[in-house]
Image (tube, rainbow, N blue to C red):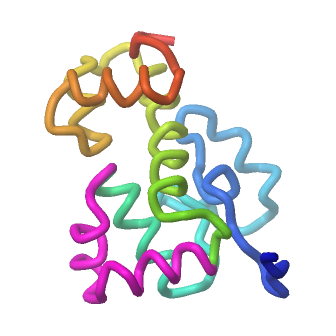
């Protein structure tokens, strides 16, 4: 049986900022609006991890661990501890949030969107969206 954490665990939706809809940031309070694309937690590890995820997109655990300078298993354990989600579940959910926003930008080509999210090709992005039951990537 899993024990409930005695500290705040963050979900991707709590961290991600919809950059296409900035008026939602007013509800966050009088603090300065973050320019990173995510809400900082104050935790050095989680903020660095989410910054890398937001910046480089969907990559392997080895890739993100190398950016942090730690072992993949340590990174996955830390992500699970701080979020309550497995590494793959967390990054896929975060990438889906980003994808939904990027697909709303009419000026961006679908190939550009897929590259921004860390996919090597549009077909990889297409398969990801279909596997996640999000439908064919298109302008929303």
Report x, y in % for residue 17.
59, 49
Query: Which of 93 and 41 lies nearest the eye of the viewer?
Result: 93
- The residue positioned 50% from the left and 37% from the top of the image is 96
- Residue occupying image coordinates x 38% and y 82%: 73
Magenta extent = 58-81
Is residue 123 rendered to the left or right of residue 74? Answer: left
Q: Nearer the viewer, residue 108 or 6?
A: 6
Give the x, y percent position of residue 70.
30, 88
Q: Establish if 66 lies above or below 122.
A: below
**In the picture, which quadrant includes the N terminus?**
bottom right
Give the side of residue 130 with respect to residue 60, left or right: right
Q: Residue lying farthest front?
A: 1
Tell me which secondary structure the magenta stretch mostly adopts: helix
**x and y, in percent, of residue 61 in the image:** 31, 67
Tell which of 121 and 20 is nearer to you: 121
Task: Give the vertical position of 11 relative to 68 (above or below).
Answer: above
Query: Residue drawn at (42%, 29%), measured in percent from left and top?
Result: 102
* Tag count: 0
User: For this view, does 131 lie left or right of residue 114?
Assistant: right
Q: Is residue 44 above or below residue 63?
A: below
Please tell me in which quadrant of the rendered image residue 122 appears: top left
Residue at 53%, 53% (x, y): give it: 89
Residue 4: percent from left, percent from top: 84, 78
103 and 69: which is toward the camera: 69
> Which quadrant would residue 29 be assigned to in this image?
bottom right
Q: Is residue 134 magenta?
A: no
């Amino acid at each position: 049986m899993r024990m409930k954490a005695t500290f705040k665990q963050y979900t991707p939706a709590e961290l991600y900022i919809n950059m296409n809809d900035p008026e939602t940031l007013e509800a966050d309070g009088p603090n300065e609006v973050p320019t990173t694309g995510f809400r900082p937690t104050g935790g050095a590890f989680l903020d660095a991890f989410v910054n890398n995820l937001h910046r480089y997109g969907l990559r392997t655990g080895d890739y993100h661990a190398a950016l942090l300078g730690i072992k993949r298993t340590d990174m996955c354990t830390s992500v699970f501890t701080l979020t309550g989600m497995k590494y793959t579940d967390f990054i896929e959910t975060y990438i889906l949030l980003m994808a939904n926003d990027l697909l709303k930008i009419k000026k961006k080509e679908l190939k550009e969107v897929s590259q921004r999210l860390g996919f090597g090709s549009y077909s990889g992005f297409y398969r990801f969206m279909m596997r996640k039951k999000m439908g064919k990537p298109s302008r929303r």
